[in-house]
Amino acid sequence: MSKKKEVSVEIQLQEVIANIDLLNELKDGGLTVDAELARLKDMEEDCEGLVALGTVSDWSISELDLPQVSEDVGGSYVPDRSDSS
């Protein structure tokens, strides 16, 4: 599966989960339709603004494959996660 398709499927899954949660809250009386509609309209405007500015990043620093500095290089040592266990 291509990365673009994978991201699309993940977004769709999150949307389905959010819709299920919303319907459960409405059913249980946890919120009103008018209040949720107002909240979502505000979120829509915020998201549209971010898209227009192009400030939404499509990567995360945690996904970068950064090299670790070893002790014998003479630099500072950065332990990996296996050292702390």
Image (spheres, grey):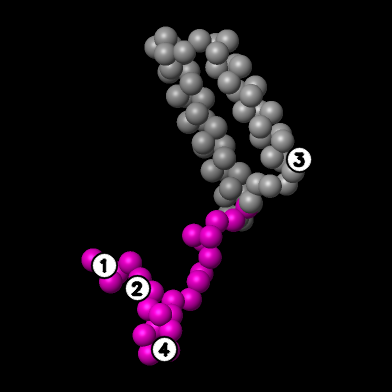
In this picture, residue 27 sits left or right of residue 61: left
Decide: marks 3, 2 in contact (CB < 8 A)?
Answer: no
x, y percentage for residue 7?
Answer: 58, 48
Q: Nearer the viewer, mark 1 or mark 4?
A: 4
How many angstroms separate mark 2 from mark 1 (CA)?
8 Å
Identify residue for label 3: 52
Decide: marks 2, 1 in contact (CB < 8 A)?
Answer: yes
Identify residue for label 1: 84
SS for callout 1? helix
What amino acid is labelled 1 in the image?
Ser
How many angstroms separate mark 1 from mark 4 (CA)?
21 Å
How many angstroms separate mark 3 from mark 2 (CA)?
41 Å
What amino acid is labelled 2 in the image?
Pro
What amino acid is labelled 4 in the image?
Gly
Decide: marks 1, 4 in contact (CB < 8 A)?
Answer: no
**Magenta portion: prevailing SS class:** loop
Decide: marks 1, 3 in contact (CB < 8 A)?
Answer: no
Q: Which residues are the magenta region? A: 58-85
Give the mark, 1 or 4, whose residue is nearer the N terminus: 4
Q: Which mark is residue 79?
A: 2
SS for callout 4? loop
How many angstroms separate mark 1 from mark 3 (CA)?
43 Å
x, y percentage for residue 41?
Answer: 65, 22
Q: Which mark is residue 74?
A: 4
Give the mark, 4 or 3, whose residue is nearer the N terminus: 3
Q: Residue at x 23, y 66 (%)?
A: 85
| Residue 68, quarter of the rendered image | bottom left
